[in-house]
């Protein structure tokens, strides 16, 4: 069942199915981030809208049609006229507004059943009456105070009557049950709000908020947020048919005081180092949000430890974990991408020591789990690449000892550092090492290995990075061979499979008789990999005048067509490996949206970074 999401730039959000049903424990109409962008709590589970006509109760959902126009929107074409509902979260507020606009042929009563709760969004409540609460009702508001957390929820409902219910009811989340995740919950039916709707055009809003404010002007909040989103589109200055992806990209940008960062995916991911860096060009650079890109890079640099960038930040306390071999190498590449868009000489000068420390950490082996080996290539422990899933002590895709994309990123990073050294008039300690890495790799890469030391020749998508990064250490002929194999064996309409279907480990479905993590990187399709494939393909077809149309038709048009026009721009994390390619995992993943948007902009439309030629031709000096 399709879902929608509305976010607030703090990590908080509102999200349900398009039929306004809660099918995940992560669903709700007010999930507030209590320590942005993490510590997310569900306070408003749902609002059930009903028509009351001549004593008959009619669910408004019977007449619903979902659409997206800056905000998630529903049109209810009832026998009594049209009601339009819009869900809006004002930027940087833990507040959800539900705006109702009506044009009716006769007066009706609209009733709203309030379903509340108070829990961390990872948790469920397996029994009724789990916590005490207080609620204070005034003429147009309720103050809801659960005693299991220090938070007050303000509920505003203008010119309406209220009837208390105070009943705990069971709730089942069908998607979570399917995932073998905790899926049985209870929610509090606190009250029923009723409002008379005249037979004329009218509008009003329900507001739910954890903000400590004395008043809320619904019309101002709505118009201000709509204008902010218009400004996001204007800044991006991309074709109109990309607007939904641009607005979707905006949802992942969140404040992590004092900097901005990128949420890896909704609903359950926090900001991850690897995901943030892979997503950065599509989320911030092609959309013209250069200051935010700079903040993200600055923010991650503050967490650098022993030359490494963290992989994850815990959702409950935001503590960093340094369990990735590739995120730090992506950091160097993303500094280059930022500079290609901005020519920010001051940034390069300021953060050059951070970049030097990164290379030194790999060379000197300051982290024994990832280090430069005697052959100049990077060796690492299992579970440290992006294929990092772990079941107990078992790694379904261990990939230890010189995974292919790590070597590609390592060489790319050394070449970038050589460029940066020359641009900043510093000693170039990197060119000679890069040549040694290139020679060593090509001597050993006698087959399309996924991992060199183990001679793992499984056909996986990781080799595409040998052909897609700015600096490639393999020949054009080998790049073409890789692109051809990936297109033949792994390409689908939603991205790249993570394993060749002929492999014995291949799983054609994410959900099956096995644990889902066994399929996560053993067949399951990942959309973000499509970006690297398109970039590699575009490089090989740079002289083809028909490339733009052919590439869009071949690699993006079907994906966008399947999502259709009743879509908010979100792209799922993963898909099953075979038709009908059922969507799985997160319903909105940053790097899925980012790499589709980036590849479409840079590699298909050919809208290249404005200072790209300056860097590649060494015309600047800092």
Image: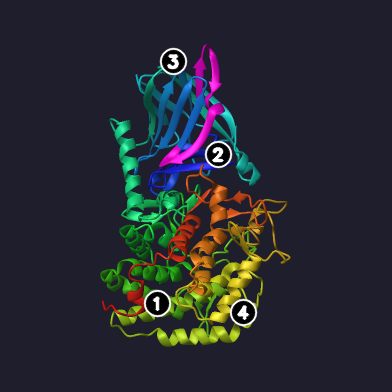
Indicate the position of residue 241 as horizontal and vertical percent values: 44, 51
> Magenta stretch containing residue 545, yes or no?
no
Q: Visible in this render: residue 48?
A: no
Query: What residue is shown with label 1?
Result: 416
- Quarter occupied by residue 499: bottom right
Q: CA distance from mark 1 to mark 3?
A: 68 Å
Residue beneath the point at 39% across and 60% down = 286
Q: CA distance from mark 4 to mark 3?
A: 75 Å
| Residues at discs 4 and 1 in contact (Cβ within 8 Å) | no
Residue beneath the point at 66% across and 75% down = 457
Which of the marked residues, 4 or 1, is nearer the chain's N terminus? Answer: 1
Residue at disc 4, secondary structure:
loop
Q: CA distance from mark 3 to mark 2?
A: 40 Å
Q: Nearer the viewer, residue 55 or 118?
A: 55
Query: What residue is shown with label 3?
Result: 107
Nearest to viewer (mark 2 / mark 1) = 1
| Residues at discs 4 and 3 in contact (Cβ within 8 Å) | no
Q: Furthest-top residue in view?
A: 54
């Amino acid at each position: 069942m399709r879902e929608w999401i509305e976010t607030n730039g703090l990590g908080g959000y509102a999200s349900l199915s398009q039929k306004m049903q809660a099918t995940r424990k992560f669903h709700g109409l007010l999930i507030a981030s209590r320590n942005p962008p993490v510590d997310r709590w569900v306070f408003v589970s749902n609002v059930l809208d009903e028509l009351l006509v001549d004593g008959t109760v009619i669910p408004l959902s019977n007449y619903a049609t979902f659409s997206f126009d800056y905000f998630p929107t529903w049109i209810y074409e009832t026998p009594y006229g049209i009601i339009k509902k819009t869900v809006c979260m004002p930027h940087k507020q833990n507040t959800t507004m539900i705006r109702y606009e009506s044009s009716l042929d006769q007066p009706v009563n609209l009733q709203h059943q309030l379903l509340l709760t108070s829990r961390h969004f990872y948790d469920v409540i397996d029994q009724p009456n789990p916590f005490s609460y207080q609620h204070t009702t005034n003429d147009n508001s309720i103050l809801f105070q659960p005693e299991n957390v220090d938070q007050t929820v303000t509920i505003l409902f203008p010119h309406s009557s209220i009837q208390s219910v105070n009943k705990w009811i069971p709730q089942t989340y069908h998607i979570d049950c399917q995932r073998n995740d905790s899926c049985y919950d209870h929610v509090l039916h606190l009250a029923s709000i009723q409002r008379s709707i005249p037979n004329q055009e009218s509008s009003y809003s329900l507001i739910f908020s954890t903000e400590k404010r004395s008043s809320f002007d619904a019309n101002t909040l709505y118009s201000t947020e709509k204008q902010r989103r218009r400004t996001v589109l204007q800044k991006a200055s991309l074709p109109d048919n990309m607007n939904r992806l641009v607005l979707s990209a905006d949802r992942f940008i969140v404040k992590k005081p004092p900097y901005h960062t990128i949420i890896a995916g909704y609903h359950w991911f926090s900001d991850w180092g690897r995901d943030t860096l892979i997503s950065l060009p599509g989320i911030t650079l092609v959309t013209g949000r250069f200051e935010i890109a700079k903040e993200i890079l600055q923010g991650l640099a503050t967490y650098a430890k022993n030359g490494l960038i963290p992989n994850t930040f815990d959702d409950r306390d935001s503590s960093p974990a340094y369990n990735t071999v590739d995120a730090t190498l992506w950091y160097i590449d993303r500094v280059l991408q930022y500079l290609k868009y901005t020519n920010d000489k001051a940034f390069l000068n300021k953060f050059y020591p951070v970049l030097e420390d990164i290379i030194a950490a790999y060379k000197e082996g300051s982290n024994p789990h990832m280090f430069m080996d005697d052959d100049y290539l990077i060796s690492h422990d299992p579970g440290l690449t992006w294929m990092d899933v772990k079941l107990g002590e078992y790694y379904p895709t261990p990939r230890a000892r010189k995974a292919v994309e790590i070597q590609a990123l390592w060489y790319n990073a050394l070449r970038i550092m050589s460029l940066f050294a020359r641009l900043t008039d510093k000693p170039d300690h990197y060119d000679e090492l890069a040549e040694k890495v290139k020679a060593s790799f090509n001597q050993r890469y006698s087959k399309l290995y996924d991992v060199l030391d183990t001679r793992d020749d499984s056909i996986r998508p990781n080799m595409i990075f040998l052909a897609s990064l700015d600096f490639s250490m393999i020949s054009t002929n080998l790049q073409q061979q890789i692109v051809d194999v990936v297109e033949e064996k792994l390409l689908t309409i939603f991205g790249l499979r993570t394993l060749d279907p002929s492999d014995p480990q291949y799983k054609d479905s994410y959900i099956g008789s096995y644990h889902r993590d066994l399929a996560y990187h053993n067949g399951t399709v990942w959309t973000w990999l499509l970006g690297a494939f398109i970039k590699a393909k575009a490089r090989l077809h740079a002289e083809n005048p028909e490339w733009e149309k052919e590439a869009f038709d071949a690699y993006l048009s079907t994906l966008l067509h399947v999502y259709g026009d009743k879509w908010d721009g979100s792209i799922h994390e993963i898909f099953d490996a075979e038709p009908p390619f059922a969507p799985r995992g997160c319903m909105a993943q940053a790097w899925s949206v980012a790499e589709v948007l980036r590849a479409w902009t840079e590699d298909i439309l050919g809208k290249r970074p404005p200072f790209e030629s300056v860097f590649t031709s060494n015309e600047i000096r800092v």
